[in-house]
Image: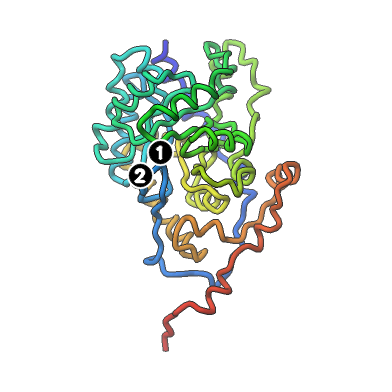
Amino acid sequence: MIADRKDDHVRHAVQHRRDHVGSNDFDAVGFVHHALAGIDAADVSLAVDMAGKRWATPLYVNAMTGGSVNTGEINRQLAVAARETGIPIASGSMSAYFRDPAVAGTYRVLRQENPDGFVMANVNANATLDQALRGIELLEADALQIHLNTVQEVVMPEGDRAFSAWPRQIEHLVAHVPVPVIVKEVGFGLSRQTVTWLREAGVAVADVGGRGGTNFARIENDRRAAADFAFIEHWGQSTPGCLLDCAGLTGIGIAASGGIRSPLDIARALALGANATGVAGVFLNTLVSNGTEALIETITTWLEQLRNILTVLGARTPADLAGTDLLITGEVATFCALRGIDVASLAHRSSWWRESNFREGVIHE
C-alpha cells in the first residue's frame, strides 16, 4: 500500500504541475532596476554556506520520493542530475524504508549514483532516533531533513492524527543525530514563531516550504474517495510571505522552497533572506516528461541564468542579494501589513550607488 501511495504522489504531483502552472506570490516581488549597478559575471560566485558545508550553488533538489520500483528509478535519475550539476539533493520521506527494509535500494541509489555529493535523508517528525540513524547510515547522509506536514496528514485518508509529540521528538533528534538537522514544511509555510522555536531547539536550517508549489492537500484530496477536503487546498502562507515574516532572524539558516519556477524566483527568494532554495515540482516534471539529460540541461541553464541575474543586480554573491531594492505588492504586501512587516524600507536598502563612487573601473577609449 505504501508503494502504491508513493507512486500516486508522483503521478498526482506531475499532473498538478501541468494543470496549475501559473502565477504565485513570487510575482508580487520585483527588483528595482539600477542601470549602472551591473558588475562582471566573472566576479560572481554562487557558493553559499549551508548546514555546516560549503555548497557550490544556492540551489538543491528538494525531497520528492522513494519506496517503490518506479520511484527508485526516479531517485536514480535525480541523483545523476545532482551529480552532474554539483547541487545537493534530499531523499523523499524514508517512512517506506522503515516499514519495509526491502525498498532500501530505492533510497540508497541517491548515494550510489552521487558518491561525493551533499545528500539529505528525509524523515517525518514521528521518526524515532533509531530510524533517523538508519536513514542517515543508509544514505551516508550529510544532513537529516525532518518534514512537517500536519495539513497533508489530516487530508490523507490513512494519515496521522496525533502531532503533540513532534516538538519533543525534534529536540531529541537534534540532540542525538551526528549530522545537522534541517526542518522543512511541505507546502504550507513556517511562521516566524515556528522558525524561532526551531532555532532555540538547535535546528541548523529551516526550510520555510511555503504555499505556491506542489500542493499536498490537493494531492491527498484527490486520493480520497469523496474528494471532500477541497476547502483546505489554499491553507498556509506563501514562500515569499514566510521569508518576509522571518526577516532579521539570526542563528539559523533559512532555506526557501515552494513555488520556485525559475532562476528569477531563486533570486527573489535569496533577496528576501533565504540562504538557499529547493526545487522539486519543476525538476520532477522535467525529468518525467523529458528525461535525465533534459533535467541536467535545465539545472545547468538555471545556474547560468542565476549568475547573470546577480551580474545585472551587482551582487557578487547570493548573500549580496539581501541588499538589493525590492518592491512588494499585491497579497504579499497585504500579508505583511497584517503581520506588522515594513516592506516600504525594502525598496530603499541598496548601497550600490555609494559603493560605485569607489569602484575601480576600466575606461575604454
Q: Quadrant of residue 226?
A: top right
Give above or below for 84 relative to 142. below
Asked whether the beta carbons under mark 2 and mark 1 sit within 8 Å of each other, the answer is yes
At 57% from the left edge and 10% from the top edge, which residue is drawn?
225
- What type is the residue that disc 2 sits on? Ile
**Looking at the rendering, in which quadrant would you find the C terminus?**
bottom left
Residue 308 in the figure: left or right of residue 198: left
Residue 75 x, y percent position in the rendering: 33, 30
Residue 23 visible in rendering: no
Numbered circle sitting on residue 87 = 2
Residue 39 x, y percent position in the rendering: 46, 69
Rendered image coloring scheme: rainbow
Numbered circle sitting on residue 86 = none
Residue 147 x, y percent position in the rendering: 49, 28
Please state which of residues 175 and 90 is positioned toward the viewer in this rendering: 175
- Bin the neighbour count of mark 2 within 10 Å (Cα to Cα): few under 14, some 14-19, many 20 and up: many
Please state which of residues 213 and 316 is positioned toward the viewer in this rendering: 316
Give above or below for 187 relative to 365. above
Give above or below for 143 relative to 41. above
Q: Quadrant of residue 143?
A: top left
Which is nearer the N-term, disc 2 or disc 1? 1
Question: In the rendered image, which residue does mark 1 sit on?
Answer: 61
Residue 232 in the figure: left or right of residue 109: right
- What type is the residue that disc 1 sits on? Val
At 32% from the left edge and 46% from the top edge, which residue is drawn?
86
At 60% from the left edge and 49% from the top edge, which residue is drawn?
248
Q: CA distance from mark 2 to mark 1?
A: 7 Å
Residue 128 visible in rendering: yes
